[in-house]
Image (cartoon, helix red, strand yellow):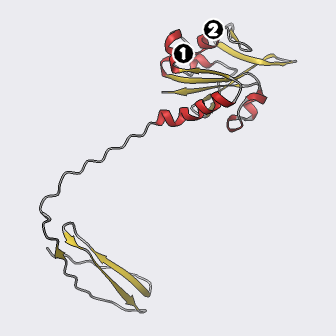
Amino acid sequence: TTGRFYFRDLAPGPYFVRARKVGYEPVVFTATLAAVDSLEASVRLTALLGVNTTRLDTMRVTAEYDRMSRRLKGFEERRTTIRGLFIDRQEVAMRKPQLLSDLLRGRANVTVQRNGVGDTQIFGTRINISTGYCPLALILDGTLINTNGGRMDNFVPIDMVAAIEVYTSGTSVPGQFARPETDCGAVIVWTR
């Protein structure tokens, strides 16, 4: 098999040139180009002994990337080092909730209320003098979601929940999730 290759507009100077083909011994050589110069080179590759160059063995590459375990690694680390409410997939399965808010009802320092239009709002311990309870922010898979006042059930289908972290005051929210919107606290949901 023969082939021709052209390289144009190369800057003057030294180059390493490598020619290779499957089943053949690669060849490496140096070439130095001067300004307004051209170079022609012939390269002959030597077949490797005992290598079938017409058919290669099948190569199968497999890799596993468990996106969930990487994301939940932080959840598990915070669970052992930070004060907060942590709900894992096993608890979600055991309680069989219909909505995200069902998992938070009856928890210490968490208030779950339905407003007049049927939206569920989730509040922490902070009380705002002018507005009363302060709704918790929703962080979904690390991204702050605008829930328009804490209406989380509309944003997270319960069958997608892998884990939940609840921080009921702004000062308890871990630094990597702290934002002005988490001043009241945050519900951090990790999905499957």
Which residue corresponds to the image point at 73% horizontal and 35% vertical from the top-left?
179
The percent position of residue 163, horizontal first and vertical second, equals 55, 24
User: Compared with residue 110, is residue 80 higher up or lower down, i.e. above or below?
Assistant: below
Residue 99 visible in the displayed image: yes
Q: Tell me, for residue 91, which label it has, or none.
A: 1
Q: Please give left or right for residue 7 compared with residue 138 in the image.
A: left
Quarter placement of the N terminus: bottom left
| Three-letter code for the amino acid on which mark 1 is drawn | Glu
Q: How crowded is mark 1: few (under 14 residues within 10 Å), some or many (20 or more)?
A: some
In this rendering, which labeled residue sits more in front, label 2 or label 1? 1
User: Compared with residue 109, is residue 82 higher up or lower down, i.e. above or below?
Assistant: below
| Residue positioned most to the right | 129
| Three-letter code for the amino acid on which mark 2 is drawn | Gly
Camera-side residue of 4 and 161: 161
The percent position of residue 137, horizontal first and vertical second, equals 69, 25
Residue 145 visible in the displayed image: no
Q: Tell me, for residue 137, which label it has, or none.
A: none
Name the quadrant containing residue 189: top right
Camera-side residue of 152 and 44: 44
User: Compared with residue 43, is residue 76 higher up or lower down, i.e. above or below?
Assistant: above
Q: Tell me, for residue 118, which label it has, or none.
A: 2
Name the quadrant containing residue 56: bottom left
The percent position of residue 26, horizontal first and vertical second, equals 26, 74
Q: Which of marks 2 and 1 is nearer the N terminus?
A: 1
The percent position of residue 25, horizontal first and vertical second, equals 22, 74
